[in-house]
Image (cartoon, helix red, strand yellow):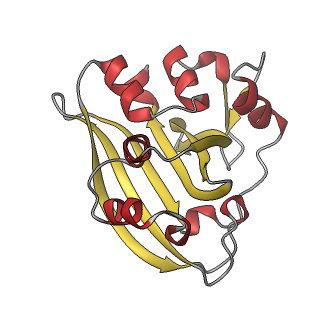
Amino acid sequence: MHRYYGLPDQGPAQSTFRCDGFLRNGQLRAPNGASLALAALPPFLRALLVTDGTVTKILEAYFWEPVTVDTVEQRFEHAAATVPWVEVAEGDRCLLRDARLRGDDSGRSFAEAFSLIRTDLIPADFRQRLIDREIGIGVLIRDSGLESYREVLDVGLVQNGAEPSAVYRTYRIIIERHPVILITEYFPLALYR
């Protein structure tokens, strides 16, 4: 859950891009100050950063192979601090989930996702299927018929060493007018170039 505590303000470039999907001369920034021009990203990767659809299905259509969501780790944890984007207060119990979106045929890892889920605000059958790790969150929402809305909150750059290694986006899923799920997805740059 520490990934969502004390997030720095990423500035107006990220906020405009995440809302509009276009920002002439825009830059993605890493926490260490490194930057990368949005125009330098492959077009498909720029689209992934702003989409409000199910990423698994978009990846399947682009890479033309089935994509499986592998749950790497899942656990309940009490929040050590507030997470305002999903109205989590210190001490609230949340489900944390690390997952990998993997191509069934190629075995390639297309993305990694870290989710913080307020299980107390989702229907019991949905919650149980989520805990049982049956399928990815996006597909589960679609299959359950829950009305939801995705709001992209942040996009940025991951800089490990001299070169950027990935781009990320953080978005929340709103169900029944409550922010319930916060997800950060990481897309490795090397795979999309």
Q: Position of residue 24 (x, y in %)?
A: 78, 15
Give left or right: position of 146 versus 9: left
Viewer-closest of 77 and 143: 143
Q: Position of residue 82 (x, y in %)?
A: 70, 73
Viewer-closest of 47 and 109: 47
Q: Looking at the picture, does residue 180 appear above or below residue 11?
A: below
Q: Quadrant of the C terminus?
A: top left
> Residue at the spot x=40%, y=46% of the render?
112
Q: Position of residue 123 (x, y in %)?
A: 47, 63
Q: Identify the residue at the far left of this view.
A: 105
- Label count reads 0
> Residue at the spot x=79%, y=51% of the render?
9
> Residue at the spot x=41%, y=67% of the render?
124
Q: Looking at the picture, does residue 68 appear above or below residue 118?
A: above
Q: Position of residue 108 (x, y in %)?
A: 25, 33
Q: Quadrant of the N terminus?
A: bottom right
Q: Identify the residue at the far right of this view.
A: 12
Give left or right: position of 106 versus 158: left
Q: Looking at the picture, does residue 5 appear above or below residue 68?
A: below
